[in-house]
């Protein structure tokens, strides 16, 4: 791997009811429940991680489930759609499954020569299942109800809605190494050739779009992947030279991160592959324990008593 941005690392969104969120992603969508931990800044709130077997970058969707959060609003300055890659021929299975579980969805459509099925999670977060023009080689996590012939492979793309896409596009192309590969009306598709999956960012430009409200059912931030800490800090220098405010390196237990808000208003993170999800649980036990950042371990009994039970 080169000293580059390696596509998407993870996407973090906001939910309300923790059990409902867990049921939808782990059971209905069939993702692996990778981690049950807490918000670094609010240890009274869970932080859930879902992904493939080992939590590969480009498959990780995470949630802060705040029980009494008000619904947010998709709008300008926000990631508004999350696209998952699925195999050809799988959309009929997913529509039947969504019918059986009362999931809101629209009929399949086509964009950039690819079929996609849009749907909403229980909090109104907008997602899409997309049949890529090129077969996705990633190995899926499977369950007894969601087999390898239909299971998600990880992220296909994420869509950012912007009043003007130009400054955001400059970050993608001049800093992150993406290239414009296609355009349909006001949707601009950017991709990196550094990785095979989770390599696409769509920018949708809507000049009159109302500003987003980040709350329940919306994306909190989008994280891009780098291989290690040295690469992370080289990108920090590049972002600083662009005149943007960026955080110091932050230890997020399973990866190390930087955060900055790109010119269009979307919160971007750059995150490392290291140290990974198996630093505190073996592979077979991922997602089975409540894991706390070290600074909160002394408060475990209090935190466990406050958090809702998840089954």
Image (cartoon, helix red, strand yellow):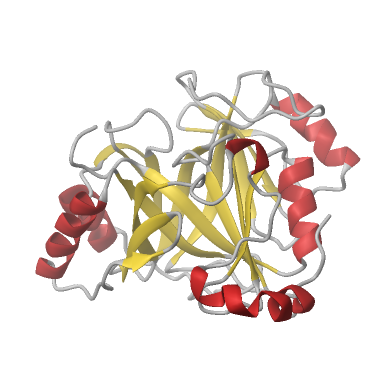
- Which residue is painted at 13% across and 63% down in the image? 237
Q: Which residue is outermost to the right? A: 100
The correct choice, above or below, for 202 with respect to 236 in the image is: above
The correct choice, above or below, for 286 with respect to 306 in the image is: above
- Which residue is painted at 50% across and 26% down in the image? 132
> Which residue is nearer to you in this view: 281 or 205?
281
The picture places residue 296, in percent across and down from the top left corner, at 56, 76
The picture places residue 87, in percent across and down from the top left corner, at 60, 22
> Which residue is nearer to you in this view: 172 or 3?
3
| 264 sits left or right of 286 in the view | left
Count of marks placed on residues? 0
**Which quarter of the figure is the C terminus placed in?**
bottom right
> Which residue is nearer to you in this view: 85 or 27?
27
The picture places residue 86, in percent across and down from the top left corner, at 60, 28
- Which residue is painted at 37% across and 28% down in the image? 196
Residue 20 can be seen in this image:
yes
Residue 184 can be seen in this image:
no
Q: Which residue is outermost to the left? A: 241
> Which residue is nearer to you in this view: 56 or 137?
56
The picture places residue 220, in percent across and down from the top left corner, at 51, 67
| 134 sits left or right of 234 in the view | right
The correct choice, above or below, for 20 with respect to 76 in the image is: above
Corner quadrant of residue 84: top right
- Which residue is painted at 69% across and 77% down in the image? 303
| 214 sits left or right of 183 in the view | right
**Which quarter of the figure is the N terminus placed in?**
top left
């Amino acid at each position: 791997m080169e000293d580059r941005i390696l596509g998407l690392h993870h996407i973090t969104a906001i939910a309300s009811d923790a059990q409902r969120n867990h049921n939808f992603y782990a059971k209905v969508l069939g993702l692996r429940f990778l981690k049950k931990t807490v918000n670094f800044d609010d240890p009274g709130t869970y932080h859930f991680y879902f992904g493939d077997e080992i939590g590969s970058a480009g498959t990780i969707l995470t949630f802060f489930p705040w029980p009494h959060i008000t619904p947010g609003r998709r709008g300008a300055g926000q990631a508004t759609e999350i696209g998952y890659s699925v195999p050809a021929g799988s959309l009929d299975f997913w529509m039947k499954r969504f019918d059986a579980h009362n999931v809101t969805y629209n009929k399949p459509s086509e964009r950039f020569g690819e079929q996609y099925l849009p749907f909403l999670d229980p909090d109104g977060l907008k997602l899409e299942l997309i049949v890529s023009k090129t077969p996705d080689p990633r190995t899926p996590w499977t369950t007894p109800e969601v087999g390898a012939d239909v299971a998600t492979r990880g992220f296909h793309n994420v869509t950012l809605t912007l009043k003007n896409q130009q400054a955001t596009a400059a970050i993608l192309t001049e800093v992150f190494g993406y290239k414009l590969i296609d355009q349909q009306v006001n949707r601009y598709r950017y991709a990196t050739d550094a990785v095979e999956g989770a390599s696409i960012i769509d920018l949708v430009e809507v000049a009159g779009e109302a500003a987003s409200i980040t709350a329940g059912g919306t994306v909190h931030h989008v994280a891009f992947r780098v291989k290690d800490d040295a690469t992370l800090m080289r990108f920090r220098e590049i972002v600083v030279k662009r005149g943007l405010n960026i955080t110091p390196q932050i230890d997020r237990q399973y990866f190390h991160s930087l955060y900055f808000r790109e010119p269009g208003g979307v919160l971007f993170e750059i995150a490392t592959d290291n140290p990974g999800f198996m630093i505190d649980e073996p592979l077979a036990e991922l997602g089975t324990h409540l894991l706390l950042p070290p600074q909160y371990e002394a408060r475990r009994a209090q935190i466990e008593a406050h958090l809702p039970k998840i089954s």
